[in-house]
Image: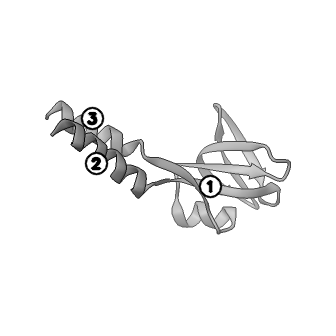
Amino acid sequence: MSIRVILLCLLAAGCTSWRTQPLAPQQVVSKRHPERIRVTLADSSVLDLKHPVIAGDSIAGKSRGTRICVASDRIARTEIRVLNEWKTSGAVFLYLSNHI
């Protein structure tokens, strides 16, 4: 495989951003099954949770190697990483315009 193709794939994979979800935290985890979520708590602190699961009325996951369980009523905002089509298209266009 060409080095250009590998670089293009890596570039496209990096064009993601955090997007706030309009769903309740349990719905985000149960419907979207994300590998990571970012939760903003009522006190404005932010946690990145890897492999989130629903645990009763809480969301559990790993943050910095430690298992954490956060009550849903403490969560003010839930975000997941999504592909940003505009960033990806722009990055691909710039890459191709400089390498053709």
Tell me what residue is drawn at x 15 percent, y 40 percent: 100
Q: List the residue tagged with mark 2.
A: 93
Above or below, 7 relative to 88:
above
Count of numbered tags:
3
Q: Comparing marks 3 and 2, which lies closer to the viewer?
A: 2
In which image quadrant can residue 30 be found?
Answer: bottom right
Q: CA distance from mark 2 to mark 1?
A: 28 Å
Amino acid type, callout 1: Glu
Amino acid type, callout 2: Phe
Q: Pick whichever, 62 or 4, lies toward us.
A: 4
Q: Pick whichever, 58 or 84, lies toward us.
A: 84
Q: Residues within 10 Å of mark 3 (few under 14, many from 20)?
A: few
User: Where in the figure is residue 52, as x and y percent of width and height?
Assistant: 61, 50
Tell me what residue is drawn at x 27 percent, y 35 percent: 7
Tag of residue 7? 3
Callout 1: SS: strand
Q: List the residue tagged with mark 1.
A: 79
Q: CA distance from mark 3 to mark 1?
A: 28 Å
Describe residue 91's horizontal placement relative to residue 21 as left or right. left
User: Where in the figure is residue 87, as x and y percent of width and height?
Assistant: 42, 50
Label whose residue precedes the other's in the sequence (3 or 2): 3
